[in-house]
Image (tube, helix red, strand yellow):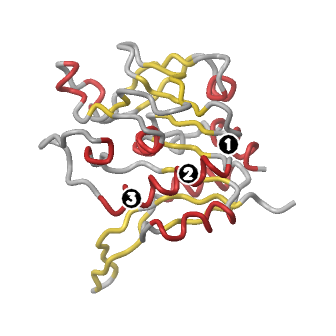
Amino acid sequence: MSRPLIGITAYLEAARWGDWVREAVLSPPSYAKAVVRAGGAPVVLPPLGPHAVEDYVRGLNGVVLAGGVEVEAAAYNGEQDERAPEPQVHRDRFELALARAAVRADVPILAIARGMHVLNVAQGGTLIPWLPEMLDHDRHGEPGATHTIQVSVSSKLGKAVGDQVEVVAPHHQSVRRLGSGLLAVAWAEDQIVEGIELQGHRFGVGVQWHPERGGDNRLFDAFMEAAR
């Protein structure tokens, strides 16, 4: 049996090798390795514009919306916070179009960190552009800090990882209003949404943390099962 073909979104950044500095398509290898461990064949998708997204979803068995910098606030009619990193508008445009095409085609989606925000905005939802401002603390943004996430046991996410999971998930944006068809299925102790699912879709799951890191591949296994 052939392996499911899984598209992984990526950066378009300047990179150095040898004496050369050139624009390059970049993706942390942890995403591709997690796809391979789950039995898939990874393909990195360059964010070169939305013109090819329909062709991608016709040829792919699943899509990973990968992590990265915060989504531009203009994408959800919000106001950009000056403390947020410079947005990557080309990547936002490509990934929002890709997410919408994958939803329409019922192609399985695993949306990770920034990817969860992309999925929410693609469905008409909004984000909290700078979470520490709303909470008066930055515990969600602390690198390396672990915290416990509560997960709905009836959700696809809960069936994959259980009702509780210890995660490292530094982030400064968060879901504010859920997009059309999305439900919150995981929460931090302060009730910030850390997992969402698209109802009526074969597999449309978004998480705030990075399941591609570490040794727990259960969420990728569940995603790959849907992709088959």
**What's the residue type where badge 3 is placed?**
Arg
Residue 191 in the image, given as x and y percentages of width and height = 39, 15
Q: Residues within 10 Å of mark 2 (few under 14, many from 20)?
A: many
Residue under the image location 56 percent in, 19 percent down: 151
Q: Which residue is mark 2?
A: 64
Report the residue that reaches farthest toward the bottom.
Answer: 19
Classify residue 197 as left or right of residue 113: right
Which image quadrant is residue 218 in?
A: top right
Which numbered tag is attached to residue 47?
A: none
**What's the residue type where badge 1 is placed?**
Phe
Residue 225 in the image, given as x and y percentages of width and height = 76, 43
Q: Nearer the viewer, residue 128 or 69?
A: 128
SS category of the residue bearing label 3: helix
Q: CA distance from mark 3 to mark 2?
A: 16 Å
Q: CA distance from mark 2 to mark 1?
A: 9 Å
Q: Which residue is mark 1?
A: 223
Residue under the image location 30 percent in, 35 percent down: 173
Q: Are marks 2 and 1 in contact (CB under 8 Å)?
A: yes
Residue 81 in the image, given as x and y percentages of width and height = 16, 40
Image label count = 3
Of mark 2 and mark 1, the one earlier in the sequence is 2
Residue under the image location 45 percent in, 45 percent down: 122
Of mark 1 and mark 3, the one earlier in the sequence is 3
Classify residue 3 as left or right of residue 7: right
Q: Are marks 1 and 3 in contact (CB under 8 Å)?
A: no
Which numbered tag is attached to residue 93?
A: 3
SS category of the residue bearing label 2: strand
**Figure quadrant of the N terminus:** bottom right
SS category of the residue bearing label 1: helix
**What's the residue type where badge 2 is placed?**
Val
Residue 188 in the image, given as x and y percentages of width and height = 41, 18
Q: Nearer the viewer, residue 226 or 138?
A: 226
